[in-house]
Image (cartoon, helix red, strand yellow):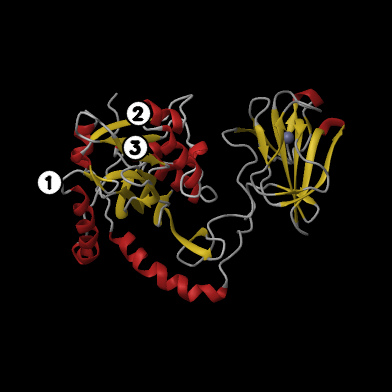
Amino acid sequence: MKLYLGFILTFLLLASCKDLGSSEKDLAEEVTIKKPKIIKQFGFNLDEFNVLQDTVRNGDSFGELMLRNNVEYPKIHKISEEFRDTFDVRKIVVGKPYLILKSKDTLEKVQVFIYQNDLINYTVIDLRDSVTAYNKRNKIKYVQREASGVITSSLSEAILEQGIDYNITNNLSQIYAWTIDFFRLQKGDKFKVIYREKYINDSIYAGAEPIEAAYFEHNGKTIYSFGYESDTINKVKEYYDEEAKNLRRAFLKAPVEFSRISSRYNLNRRIAYYGYKVRPHKGTDYAAPIGTPILATANGTVEESTRRGGNGKYVKIKHNSTYSTQYLHMKNQNVRKGQYVQQGDVIGWIGMTGNTGGPHVCYRFWKNGRQVDPLREELPKAEPLSDALKPDYFAFISPLKEQLDCIEFMELSEEELLTEND
Ligand SMILES: [Zn+2]
C-alpha cells in the first residue's frame, strides 16, 4: 500500500493577503542569507586566538581547567575570590560548553575564558592584564512562521515530516486538548499555525516559541485560538477563540493520560454475572496499567480519601457547589481529606482494589448531587476573559485572524490523489 502524503505545508498566500505575507517573508530571508564575515563570537574575533573548545567534564573544576592550561595559581585564586558575583567558579556544571582563547604565539598563554551558562547567557573572564569578568547575552532574534496542513495520517507525523519543531505538535495538542480528541483525528482535518522561531546571533536555531495563533478544522467544525496574556502580572498566557471564550475547560477530558475507555456511563447496562439484570454503570472506566497516575480533572478540595466496599480505595473531590468527581479502585491514594488539589495533580494510582475485574479507574462525575455522564455534559469553561480586557483582546487578535485566514491549504487534486495511490 502506498503511504499517504502526511500533509502539505504551504506558504502560498492569496493575492489579497500579499501585503501581510511579504513582511514575514523578508524576515525569514534575513536569517537564511549568509553574509561573508569574520568569525566574531562572544565579542571576540576567534581568528586572533588559538581556540580550545570543550565541555565541562565529570570531575573538572575551574581551577583545574586553568592549571591544566598553565594559568598561575594566584590568578586563579583571584578569579574565584573577587568575581563571585559575576562568576561563581563552584557553580560550573558538567556538560556546559566553554572556550579558552589562547595567544597565537608559542607561549599559548590563556587570554580569555568563556563559559556558556545556556544558549543565550555567557560569562567572560578576561585574563589579559588585570583580570576582568562580565556576563553577556547573545543577540536573540525572532522570526515569525506560518504553516498549514491537511491531516491524512497523524498530527505529529504531519508536522515532523515538514521539519517543523516538535514543540509545535505538543503545543497544538495542548491548546486543543479540551476541544479536540487527538486520538480521533480524521482524515481531512486541517490546521494552520502562526508561531515564532528563536535564533541566537541570527543563525543558531534555538527552538519554537509558544504558538501565537492557530486554526483547527475537525470534523467540519472550526476552532480558532489566540494566545493572549490575560494576566500581565503573573505573565499567564491563555488561549481564547475569536469570541474571547477560553479554550480550556474547567475539567480535563479524562483522569488518565493515554488510557482507553473500557466501559462508558450506561444506565441500562446488563451483566451476565448478575443474570443479565440491569446493573447501571454510573461511571466511565478508563483502563490503564497498574501504577499509572490518576489526575484530578479540576481544581478542588478532597472530600474523601478512603477505602470502602466495592469502590476500593477512592478519592472524591468537591470542585464547587455544583460539581464533584470521584475516582475508584486505586492502588493507593496520593492525597488526604481536606487537601486542595489543582487540575492535573496526581491524586493516586491505577489499581484493582474493590470490585473490579482488571486495572482501571472508575471515574464518577457528580452534578448537583447526581451522577451524570461527563462525556455528554457541556462542561463549564475555564475562567473567561474579563470584560475589561475584551476591547484590547479583539484589537490584538484582529490582524492575527486576518493572517490566519490568509494562509492557504494546498490540497491535491483528485487526479493527483489517484496517481498518489497507484
Ligand atoms: Zn466503573
Amino acid at the residue labelled 2: Asn
Image quadrant occupied by the C terminus: top left
First-in-chain label (2 vs 3) = 2
Q: Which mark is residue 160?
A: 3
Local SS, label 1: loop
Q: Give the alpha-carbon distance from disc 1 to disc 3, as whole Å.
A: 32 Å
Of 307 and 58, nearer the camera is: 58
Of 411 and 391, nearer the camera is: 391
Amino acid at the residue labelled 3: Leu
Q: Please indicate, yes or no, whether residue 234 appears anywhere in the rendered image.
A: yes
Image quadrant occupied by the N terminus: top left
Local SS, label 3: helix
| x 68%, y 36%: residue | 294
- Other residues around mark 1 within 10 Å, as few (<14) / some (14–19) / many (≥20): few
For label 2, the residue is: 70
Local SS, label 2: loop
- Other residues around mark 3 within 10 Å, as few (<14) / some (14–19) / many (≥20): some
Q: Which mark is residue 36?
A: 1
Q: Is residue 338 left or right of residue 395?
A: right
- Other residues around mark 2 within 10 Å, as few (<14) / some (14–19) / many (≥20): few
Q: Which mark is residue 291?
A: none
